[in-house]
Image (tube, rainbow, N blue to C red):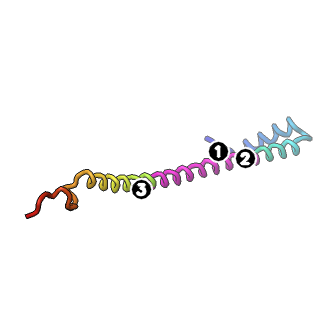
Amino acid sequence: MGDIGWQEIMLVLIIALLLYGKNLPQVAKKVGNTYGNFKRKISDVRDDIEREIRNADANIDVTSAVNSDLDAAGAKQSGVQNSDINPSSSTSTGQNDGPTA
């Protein structure tokens, strides 16, 4: 199914000749131009879709990198805040040590 043999092509040419007669060259030119325009439009759409996919992939990569940087910065920030809140983990500053003997 889908294979076109020489017999089918001849049948289409004979029908076209009967229908269009003298205008057949102009009709063939219009059909060819229309087909070419159609293929160009399809190619443009395909290129646009591929470009958008590449842009989306690049945006995902950038977003992932930014998120991992933010996560790392957040971990560092939370580590600093924990040491500020819990003085037992840091060295004594000498304040409120009480009398020394």
> Is 55 inside the magenta-drawn segment?
yes
> Is 37 inside the magenta-drawn segment?
yes
Q: Residue at x 37, y 56 (%)?
A: 72
Q: Which residue in the protein does label 2 denote?
A: 6
Q: Nearer the viewer, residue 87 or 24?
A: 87
Q: Amino acid at mark 2?
A: Trp
Question: What range of the chain is rendered magenta?
Answer: 36-65
Q: Which residue in the protein does label 1 denote?
A: 3
Left or right, residue 67 beside residue 59:
left
Res 76 quadrant in image: bottom left
Look at discs 1 and 3 and give the one toward the viewer.
Answer: 3
Residues at circles 1 and 2 in contact by the CB criterion of under 8 Å: no
**The C terminus is located in which quarter?**
bottom left
Mark 2: give few (<14), some (14-19) or many (20+) Cα within 10 Å.
Answer: few
Image disc number at residue 69: 3
Res 3 quadrant in image: top right
